[in-house]
Amino acid sequence: MTFYDGSAPVFTHTLTALSAILTKAEAHAAANKIAPEELLNAQLHPSMYPLTRQVQLACDFSGKACARFTQTELPVMADTETTFSELLARIAKVLANIKALPPAKYEGAEKREITFPVGPGKTMTVTGQQFLNHSAMPQFFFHCTTAYDILRHKGVEIGKRDFLGAV
Amino acid sequence: MTFYDGSAPVFTHTLTALSAILTKAEAHAAANKIAPEELLNAQLHPSMYPLTRQVQLACDFSGKACARFTQTELPVMADTETTFSELLARIAKVLANIKALPPAKYEGAEKREITFPVGPGKTMTVTGQQFLNHSAMPQFFFHCTTAYDILRHKGVEIGKRDFLGAV
């Protein structure tokens, strides 16, 4: 097993599933004469991020993690998406970014130190393996699942099979 | 990197965090004179599983995955939990089960074929790596996150730091 095998393909698989989920959500809004913004701005609690931000964060945690593992430049995004089309384009962009990083560049990443932000003006340094296990992977799935949960909460007809994608 | 490094520690870390989240939820119910059942039976949508079932499934997807990776007996649980204490005991049990499996038993699991149920009377066979990446890991985080989302939705004072646990 390589470090690549346990990281990039996990992200690209679930990002692809998230893209299909958003496409279904957009169709649900159109079919039910719901304004897309009602879904895009939906939250599970007033103190939680809305759908749009959950998708942006799922993109960031996966795209930045792969950049850190491969010691390449961190992707910077403007976070200006306000439509389903723009969110789909963002996912397409992060998928392209991740797929452009050759597996060989992940070699040794599990042991390399990675320094990442953990709050305003604070960073943490851990090994690549710890970063994957306890930050990148949980953060990524947290935001993908919460995006899904928001849409289920709003009545969009999706199921866990959509979340799991094509195995 | 070993297959063990990318699997068991991910599960045990987030199960430990989930246990602390449930402890906070129980305290929240007591402090606000909310019947514990109101949280335990809470759902994000009438067609989604309630908190209790989300926790049971998080335990199952992690515990069974580790049993499959190590070719040991699948843990069988009765799914009879109706209180926070019983859910905490279930998490403690699956944590003990996973920690009892020596890392050496995971050797080669990434390439071994794993057959698992994917619906009534249906199974699928994939490599251990594919099973981890596209079933065990997404399923596990899906149910842990949804448990968290249900509690946030119900107003329990938890944050993503609780979900991430102690890094």
Image (spheres, coloured by chain):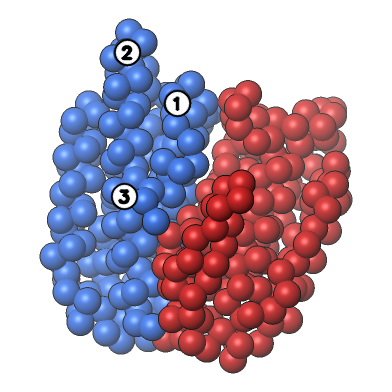
Chain colours: A blue, B red
Residue A60 at x, y = what percent? 29, 52
Question: Going 54% across and 67% down the picture, which residue do you hit?
Answer: B115
Q: Label 2: which residue?
A: A31
Left or right relative to B105: residue A6: left
Q: Are marks 1 and 3 in contact (CB under 8 Å)?
A: no
Q: Are marks 3 and 2 in contact (CB under 8 Å)?
A: no
Which part of the image, by quadrant, shows the N terminus of chain A?
bottom left
Q: Is residue B153 above or below residue B55?
A: above
Helix, strand or loop under label 3: helix
**Residue type for callout 2:** Ala
Q: Label 3: which residue?
A: A15
Residue B120 at x, y = what percent? 61, 46
Whether labels 1 and 2 belong to a single chain: the reply is yes
**Which mark, residue A33?**
none
Comparing A30 with A89, the one in front is A30
Q: Of all residues shown, which one is farthest toward the top?
A: A33
Residue A121 at x, y = what percent? 36, 59
Question: Going 84% across and 29% down the picture, which residue do you hit?
Answer: B35
Q: Of all residues shown, which one is farthest toward the front?
A: B121
**Residue type for callout 3:** Leu
Left or right relative to A113: residue B78: right
Q: Is residue B159 above or below residue B101?
A: above
CA distance separating discs 1 and 3: 19 Å
Question: Going 48% across and 21% down the picture, which residue do you hit?
Answer: A155
Q: In front: mark 3 or mark 2?
A: 2
Quarter of the figure with residue A95: bottom left
Mark 1 vs mark 2: which is more N-terminal? 2
Mark 1 vs mark 3: which is more N-terminal? 3
Q: Label 1: which residue?
A: A157
Chain under numbered label 2: A
Mark 3 vs mark 2: which is more N-terminal? 3
Left or right relative to B136: residue A56: left
